[in-house]
Image (tube, rainbow, N blue to C red):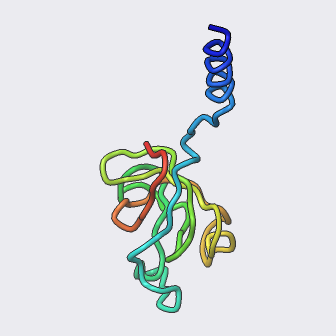
Amino acid sequence: MRGLKSIVAVGLVALLAAPVAQAGDCTGIVVGVRAISQYNHANGNGFLAVRSGPGSRYTQIGELYAGDEYWVAERRGNWVYVGCMSGRCENPLWGPPYPEGWSYAKYLSYGGVCP
């Protein structure tokens, strides 16, 4: 019986020490947008818009670029709440660095523990 108690105790300690998955554990990269060399803000080329809400009618507040890495916090239909982690979005051609907001999911490839 003593050996069983030790095994249970070790298992419990391992379970308690395991990291808890959080929304930040879901990450990805921007895909399917034109290369930065084709950037044209007025025409919407060379970037993925980051918006204030989940839809194209919301104001653009930032930009992500092909290959940028980001975290995911929420999903609403075809829209995903993201934040820049690394890449060109650290020093964007338009808007603030490290933008955070809603982007269209078609241009995002992500995985991990996702919402």
Pick the residue in front: 75 or 11. Answer: 11
Q: Residue at x 63, y 21 (%)?
A: 7
Which residue in the rendered view is the most extreme toward the left?
Answer: 77
Q: Position of residue 61 (x, y in %)?
A: 54, 60
**Does 98 sit above or below residue 78?**
below
Which residue in the rendered view is the most extreme toward the bottom?
Answer: 37
Q: Residue at x 65, y 67 (%)?
A: 86
Which residue in the rendered view is the most extreme toward the top?
Answer: 1
**Does 45 sit above or below residue 13?**
below
Q: Does 73 sit left or right of 8 as displayed?
A: left
Q: Does 22 sit left or right of 47 as displayed?
A: right
Q: Does 6 sit left or right of 65 as displayed?
A: right
Q: Position of residue 4 (x, y in %)?
A: 61, 14
| Quarter assignment of residue 68 | bottom right
* Number of marks present in the image shown: 0
Pick the residue in front: 26 or 42. Answer: 26
Q: Quadrant of the C terminus?
A: top left
**Does 80 sit above or below residue 22?**
below
Q: Position of residue 59 (x, y in %)?
A: 46, 58
Q: Position of residue 69 (x, y in %)?
A: 57, 66
Q: Residue at x 68, y 17 (%)?
A: 6
Q: Quadrant of the N terminus?
A: top right
